[in-house]
């Protein structure tokens, strides 16, 4: 493990916690930000191990990606914790929260401990792992630690992780008080629609089988149960205008929601261009859904952004629908995608930083992350908001080796990524000696 050290970042455009940009310096020592000022001379008697001249670059809090599928253990042919964390470092993602649909499923403390041990050995960035709900593992759900919360697949999942039906869901919502994160799609409706569309091999049908109604039904049920028990609820990857409007009308203070860049920036027209690579759950929707989701994000109805990084190999994606797996990679492209939106006037850089870092830290009660201020962890990313570069397949580090955004010309690419005060990525090069830490979560 690399030893902690001190680092001085000079002449950066620093995004301050109040959303203003200030040109100045940031001093880091032993993994923490110790000073932010317009000019810092080296601290007393402290020979800085390193100075970075960040002239022309913008310094943002490192991205916390709160929904990823990194496939280890059990599905390492798609991705593993090392390759995924390399992709994170390149994408400015300094922390991630990973989902339980690995093999074995992360439904016990032992499985959670195994993931934490693997991550401590090979992850270049900070990590946290959800505990997955089954119909039977309530004791595990109550006691598991450390974990950002309980993940429930209400639909679009096979095997024990599928918890459909109000009664089983109610048993989880009514016990304990830790955060419940739901993949909200109604399994009964999906199954019925699957029969109606049986025989079709057009991947565009995916958005009709798992339609807006399937998402809305499940989100309504999750909200109902959350309201009944005043249970902390997070709605993962909100995908439809209908769900956003529902939340706009009545969103309890203890409910949060996220959206993916895919659901903001891609829609059903993507099937024509990239076929099954556009297949994910919940599926891509219409341009009108894109618009309503954007507005909900801008208005604070949706709280933050997650990628749902869900890699599958090109070979798997080359099968014929519906035998193709759902999911797309995302950690390498999410920050430049969103910063490009900011540079092009859709939102501000401060909003992007909030949606991709501060708001996530707040929702999951991750202490000392999400801001550039003295006392915060030095998880940072220096981005270039002046130049554009395309997403190129040959440059991707995710093991799956493709992106739905290939060819998109983006700005805001990370130039330097810092995890716990250590430079983990710089100008196209990784420092694979850096290791992240297990995230901690303050109690509810
Ligand atoms: O598209 C998806 N793929 N959505 C999910 O919720 C699961 C994921 C996966 O693990 O492949």
Image (cartoon, rainbow, N blue to C red):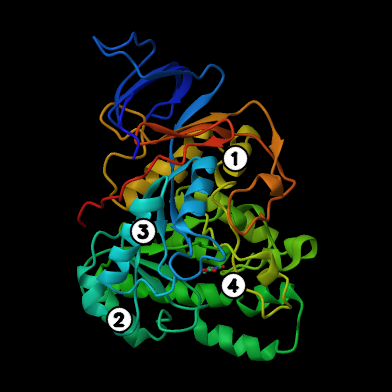
Q: Nearer the viewer, residue 119 or 332?
A: 119
Point 60% across, 70% down: residue? 326
Compared across the picture, whether 321 is left or right of 430 comes to right
Q: Is residue 173 left or right of residue 75?
A: left
Q: CA distance from mark 4 to mark 1?
A: 28 Å
Which residue position holds label 2?
170
Q: Which residue is mark 4?
A: 212
User: Which element is circle 1 on?
Assistant: helix
Q: Position of residue 94 (x, y in %)?
A: 42, 43
Question: Where, by quadrant of the figure, is residue 269 drawn?
Answer: bottom right
Residue at 63% across, 56% down = 290
Position above or below: 426 against 149: above
Instruction: From the image, state whether disc 3 or disc 2 is nearer to you.
Output: 3
Dot 4 crowding, Cα within 10 Å, few <14, some 14–19, many 20+: many
Q: CA distance from mark 3 to mark 2?
A: 33 Å
Residue at position x 21%, y 77% in the image: 139
Q: Which residue is mark 1?
A: 336
Mark 3 vs mark 4, foreground winner is 3
What is the quadrant of the N terminus in the image? top left
Nearest to N terminus: mark 4 or mark 1:
4
C-beta proximity under 8 Å, tags 4 and 2: no
First along the sequence among labels 4 and 2: 2
Choose the circle earlier in sequence order: 3 or 4: 3
Dot 4 falls on a residue whose secondary structure is helix
* Label 3 with label 2: CB-CB less than 8 Å: no
What numbered label is drawn on residue 118?
A: 3
Q: Is residue 29 above or below residue 187?
A: above
> Does the CB distance between marks 4 and 1 fall below 8 Å?
no
Characterize the local packing of mark 2: few (<14), some (14-19) or many (20 or more) Cα atoms within 10 angstroms.
some
**For residue 397, above or below residue 222:** above
Secondary structure at numbered mark 3:
helix
Image point (28%, 64%), residue name: 113
């Amino acid at each position: 493990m690399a030893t902690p050290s001190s680092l001085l970042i000079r002449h950066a455009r620093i995004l301050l916690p109040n959303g203003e940009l200030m040109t100045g310096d940031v001093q880091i020592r032993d993994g923490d930000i110790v000073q932010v000022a317009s000019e810092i001379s080296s601290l007393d008697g402290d020979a800085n191990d390193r100075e970075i001249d960040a002239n022309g670059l913008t310094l943002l809090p490192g991205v916390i990606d709160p929904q990823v599928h990194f496939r280890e253990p059990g599905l390492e042919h798609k991705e593993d914790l090392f390759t995924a964390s390399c992709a994170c470092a390149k994408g400015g993602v300094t922390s991630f929260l990973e989902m339980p649909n690995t093999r074995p499923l992360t439904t016990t403390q032992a499985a959670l401990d195994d993931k934490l041990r693997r991550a401590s050995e090979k992850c270049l960035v900070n990590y946290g792992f959800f505990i997955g709900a089954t119909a039977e593992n309530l004791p595990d759900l109550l006691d598991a630690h450390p974990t950002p919360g309980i993940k429930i697949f209400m639909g679009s999942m096979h095997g024990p992780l599928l918890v459909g039906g109000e009664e089983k869901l109610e048993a989880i919502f009514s016990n304990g008080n830790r955060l419940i994160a739901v993949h909200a799609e109604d399994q009964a409706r999906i199954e019925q629609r699957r029969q109606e569309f049986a025989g079709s091999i057009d991947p565009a049908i995916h958005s009709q089988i798992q339609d807006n109604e399937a998402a809305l039904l499940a989100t309504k049920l999750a909200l109902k149960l959350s309201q009944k028990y005043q249970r902390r609820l997070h709605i993962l990857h909100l995908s439809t205008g209908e769900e956003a409007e529902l939340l706009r009308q009545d969103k309890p203070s203890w409910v949060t929601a996220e959206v993916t860049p895919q659901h903001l920036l891609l829609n059903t027209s993507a099937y024509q261009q990239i076929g099954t690579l556009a297949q994910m759950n919940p599926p891509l929707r219409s341009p009108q859904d894109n618009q309503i989701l954007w507005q909900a994000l801008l208005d604070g109805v949706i709280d933050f952004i997650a990628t749902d990084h869900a890699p599958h190999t090109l070979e798997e994606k080359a099968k014929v629908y519906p035998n193709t797996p759902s999911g797309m990679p995302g950690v390498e492209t999410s920050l430049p995608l969103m910063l490009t939106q900011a540079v092009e006037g859709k939102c501000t850089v401060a909003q992007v930083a909030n949606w991709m870092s501060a708001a996530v830290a707040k929702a999951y009660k991750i202490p000392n992350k999400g801001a550039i201020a003295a006392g915060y962890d030095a998880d940072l990313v220096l981005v270039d908001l002046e130049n554009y570069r395309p997403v190129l397949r040959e440059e991707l580090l995710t093991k799956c080796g493709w992106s739905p955004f290939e060819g998109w010309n983006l700005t805001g690419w990370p130039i330097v990524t810092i995890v716990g005060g250590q430079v983990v990525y710089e100008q196209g090069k990784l420092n694979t000696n850096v290791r992240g830490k297990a995230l901690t979560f303050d109690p509810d």
